[in-house]
Image (tube, rainbow, N blue to C red):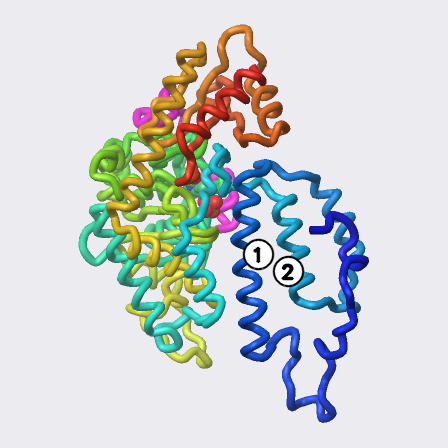
Amino acid sequence: MPEGCPLSRFSTSDLSSNTGPDQDGVVSAVPAFFPSAEARKQVDDWLTNELALASERVKSGRVSPQATVQDFSARLEAFDFSRPLPSTSVLAWIIGNMIDGIVHVDHPRYFGLFNPAPTFPSQCSDRIASTFNPQLATATTSPFPVALEAFLIRALGHRLGMPSGASGHFTNGGSEANATAVICALTRASPDFATAGARAFSGQPRLYTSEAAHLAWLKIAHNCGIGRSAICLVPTDGHGRMDANQLAASITQDIKCGAVPILIASTAGTTGAGMVDPLGACSEIAKQHMVWYHVDAAWGGALMCSEKLRGALSGIEAADSITVDGHKFLATTMGCGIFLTPHASTLSAAFHVTMDCMPSNTAEWDPYVRSMQWSRRFIGLRLFTSLATAGWQGYAYHVERAVALTQMLKIELIKRGWVCLNDSPMAVLCMRPPAGAASPTSIAQSVVAGGSAWISTVDFEGQSAVRFCITSGETTPADLADLIRSLDNAA
Ligand SMILES: *Cc1c(COP(=O)(O)O)cnc(C)c1O
């Protein structure tokens, strides 16, 4: 499809039939928005076919984009919303630009951040959700979707070993789930927080997480109104895990200074290196100081599916709340975060509200009175259909396979003189190139520019390293061999 100006490519001859009003101006709908059932099916079938072809093209093409955001901005300047185009022209133009204009996280040689190649059932789910467009704010408006999500939340809570009756909901992502934990912790810590906000506390509220944690915590503290200085980044232990002794010392010191410890957030699967904080020790410290204990398992939580690997999450069952992302290791389409807690009453204390126009207001069922969102998409369907069609065993295989491929890559690179810095039970490696080779940054840049694979760099315990993560469920040993060839050339 075209790279340049879209307008030169398309005819606007059917413009009037596409947008013209009938004589009264109220009888017919806008045809571009609401085509006839027959026209709709035609476009749908065409789109299904185009997307399948695009998917094939992506897998045999470059992983990284063909042009920069400035190039695409310039192309878009040619767009004119006063000159509507036929829908297939617009959609074809978009698909062409998607092929050229993104890092293809669904490419089998994308070894990048935790963005997965999405499962086919989750893609189908998005299509179903888009077709019906259910409103999940209340159980009254969407009894089936709300019941389905509640069922799935209970199943996930059970799988993670939470006490029966685990509550929670789907979020837009891990950041929203982590923010939910902070609001719950603040709400439980002081009965005045709901009305007085941060002024409810006698001193600065404090949240503890490690230096290797996902730094969305800073934004969360800012957004919750307790300020970024609320975050205490506890040093790591030399292996990328929170140092529990330092955690205990920081809390003691803070209390002495009049600060108010609110929450400890351990990470199970750090973003950089897939390390797991000492969950049991952190949980004990939380209990001792009566602070909320959260485990951020946005990526690593997927290990719950595997009997072989789930031991790495041991201790998570004691958490007051847990974050897992469907759209990471569980490979759903984007925007499928999960918040789990055994404290249903704290959730409704934190998010309750009444508004006359809403069809119902029950703490037990209605998502809008127990979560941050109001209008709510059918997020959980993506994970439900994936689990329903592959089962826990399918997910176990998906996760174990990624970990096994990671070990294969590690062994191959060590043979070539690379050094592995992290010892993660998950599917990510932080590796130093052999002595005398190019720097991690220049190796990563060279591989990405070549287009055959996508990797990144990371700072692990003060050392710069190349980061490799198996994120696609379709990566094969042959893809690893390709990657190693690119690395040999770059190093
Ligand atoms: C990705 C990630 C987050 C943020 O989640 P989003 O879904 O991107 O909002 C938080 N914590 C960890 C450990 C993560 O890997």
Query: Which quarter holds ligand 1?
Result: top left
Q: Is residue 162 left or right of residue 482?
A: left
Task: Give the magenta range.
Answer: 218-245
| Alpha carbons under labels 2 and 1: distance apart | 9 Å
* Helix, strand or loop status at disc 2: helix
Q: Position of residue 53 (x, y in %)?
A: 55, 51
- Above or below, 357 against 373 in this view is below
Picture quadrant where residue 251 is located: top left
**What amino acid does circle 1 point to?**
Glu
- Residue shown at 33%/41% (left/top)? 398
- Above or below, 106 against 26 in this view is above
Picture quadrant where residue 149 is located: bottom left
In which quadrant is the C terminus drawn?
A: top right
- Please give the residue where the numbered disc 2 appears in the rendered image: 91
- Above or below, 383 against 434 in this view is below
Farthest residue in the bottom direction? Answer: 24
**What amino acid does circle 2 point to?**
Leu
Nearer to us: label 2 or label 1: 1
Q: Position of residue 327 (x, y in %)?
A: 43, 48
Q: Is residue 190 left or right of residue 99?
A: left
Q: Position of residue 13 (x, y in %)?
A: 78, 72
Is there any visible trace of residue 233 in the rendered image? no
- Please give the residue where the numbered disc 1 appears in the rendered image: 50
- Residue shown at 45%/62% (left/top)? 373
Q: Are marks 2 and 1 in contact (CB under 8 Å)?
A: yes
Q: Is disc 1 surrounded by few (<14), some (14 to 19) or many (20+) residues within 10 Å?
A: some
- Residue shown at 27%/62% (left/top)? 151
